[in-house]
Image (tube, rainbow, N blue to C red):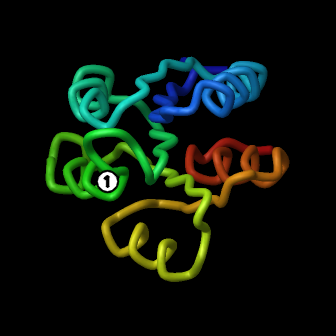
């Protein structure tokens, strides 16, 4: 097993963030978290995580804006983005994918679906 893959959780709701952190650390990933949109880009640029679990609705800067900013930065082109939203309709999904998200999951998410999607994006075998 090589170096642990890193995941940055960008989520303003503590209970969801704690559940994600617990779940992903049990899967063996190195986890960090920011709780606002304003903190997200500096953290992504500094940490260069393998994957960003990105909430759509955040204080200050939306997940869509963050996704677009990451995609406009050539030095971050290998960072994967999995967007999460409580409003998981097709329009939201299309918008996220159009802005460059690698995947999209609706809240509340099924644990097995989330784990499978994270493994898919990080190229980890199940």
- In this image, 73 relative to 119: left or right? left
Instruction: Give the quarter of the figure containing the N terminus.
Output: top right
Name the residue at 17% across, 41% down.
75
- In this image, 122 relative to 112: left or right? left
Residue found at the very far front of the displayed protein: 59
Of the pair 38 and 42, the residue shown nearer to us: 38
- In this image, 3 relative to 28: left or right? left
Task: Give residue 27's quadrant in the image.
Answer: top right
In the rendered image, residue 49, in percent from the top left (x then y), is placed at: 40, 30
Name the residue at 54% across, 27% down.
5
In the rendered image, residue 28, in percent from the top left (x then y), is placed at: 70, 21
Name the residue at 24% across, 58% down.
68
- At numbered mark 1, what does the secondary structure look like: helix, strand or loop? helix
Packing grade of label 1 (10 A; few <14, some 14-19, many >=20) is many
In the rendered image, residue 3, in percent from the top left (x then y), is placed at: 54, 18
Of the pair 115 and 55, the residue shown nearer to us: 55
Of the pair 84 and 57, the residue shown nearer to us: 57
| Above-or-below relation of 121 to 47 | below
Number of numbered callouts drawn: 1
Q: Which residue is mark 1?
A: 67
| Above-or-below relation of 116 to 40 | below
Task: Give residue 41's quadrant in the image.
Answer: top left
In the rendered image, residue 4, in percent from the top left (x then y), is placed at: 58, 20
Instruction: Give the quarter of the figure containing the C terminus.
Output: top right
Name the residue at 31% across, 32% down.
40
């Amino acid at each position: 097993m090589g170096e642990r893959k890193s995941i940055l959780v960008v989520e303003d709701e503590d209970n969801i963030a704690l559940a994600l952190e617990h779940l992903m650390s049990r899967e063996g990933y190195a986890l960090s978290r920011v709780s606002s949109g304003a903190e997200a880009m500096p953290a992504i640029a500094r940490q260069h995580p393998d994957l960003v679990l990105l909430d759509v609705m955040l204080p200050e800067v939306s997940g869509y804006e963050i996704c677009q900013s990451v995609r406009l930065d050539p030095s971050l082109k290998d960072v994967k983005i999995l967007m999460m939203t409580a409003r998981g309709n097709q329009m939201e999904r299309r918008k996220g994918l159009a802005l460059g998200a690698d995947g999209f999951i609706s809240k509340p998410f099924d644990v097995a679906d989330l784990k499978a999607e994270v493994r898919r994006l990080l190229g980890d075998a199940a």
